């Protein structure tokens, strides 16, 4: 659900901070397209995700993109926030574009490969 004038979107279980939902009924192509549509929103749009999965997602993101310093920084910040019992949401389009490997995937095939890898990833 999108409130475009207010720059707010409730994204349910499609996108999580630094991650995305599992594929149950849809195809990787559909999920990739849904994520790309969200990333076309204004950069300062606040994204409210359905679950607080940021820390586990950050660990996978650091594994998927070891050279990405924005991911390394966010992993560190997220770990500190969770240590203090703080909520890491909402996120934003700008933050996800910089640190979410699933939206940064160049095409749906790369997205599908990441999604499959994440399904069996133990941090
Ligand atoms: Fe859920």
Image (spheres, rainbow, N blue to C red):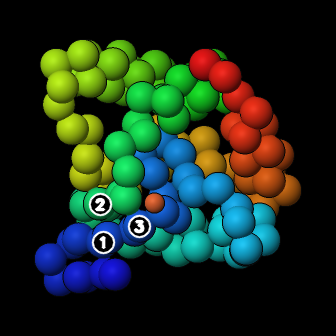
**Disc 1 to disc 3, C-alpha distance:** 9 Å
Q: Which residue is mark 3?
A: 12
Q: Quadrant of ligand 1?
A: bottom left
Queried on whether the Cβ of the residue with tag 3 lies below 8 angstroms from ligand 1, the answer reads yes
Q: Nearer the viewer, residue 67 or 77?
A: 77
Q: Report if residue 95 is visible in the image.
A: no
Circle 2 residue = 48
Q: CA distance from mark 2 to mark 3?
A: 7 Å
Rendering coords of residue 104 (x, y %): 61, 48
**Can you tell which quarter of the image residue 26 is in?**
bottom right
Q: Residues within 10 Å of mark 2 (few under 14, many from 20)?
A: many
Where does label 1 land, which residue? 9
Q: Position of residue 3 (x, y in %)?
A: 23, 82
**Upstream in sequence: badge 1 or badge 2:** 1
Give the image location of residue 65, x and y in percent: 64, 27
Q: Secondary structure at mark 2?
A: strand
The quarter of the image holding the C terminus is top right
Contact? badges 2 and 3 (CB < 8 Å) = no
User: How far across and how far down the image is residue 41, in percent?
Assistant: 38, 72
Residue 6 drawn above or below residue 93:
below
The answer to whether 66 is drawn above or below residue 23 in the figure is above
Residue name at image x 17 percent, y 31 percent: 86
**Viewport quadrant of the N terminus:** bottom left
């Amino acid at each position: 659900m999108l409130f475009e004038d207010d720059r707010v979107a409730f994204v349910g279980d499609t996108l999580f901070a630094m991650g995305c939902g599992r594929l149950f009924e849809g195809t990787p192509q559909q999920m990739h397209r849904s994520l790309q549509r969200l990333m076309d929103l204004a950069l300062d749009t606040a994204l409210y995700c359905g679950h607080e999965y940021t820390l586990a997602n950050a660990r996978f993101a650091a594994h998927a993109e070891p050279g990405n310093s924005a991911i390394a920084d966010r992993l560190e910040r997220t770990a500190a926030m969770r240590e203090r019992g703080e909520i890491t949401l909402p996120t934003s389009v700008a933050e996800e574009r910089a640190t979410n490997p699933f939206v940064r995937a160049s095409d749906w095939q790369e997205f599908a490969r990441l999604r499959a890898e994440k399904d069996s990833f133990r941090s």
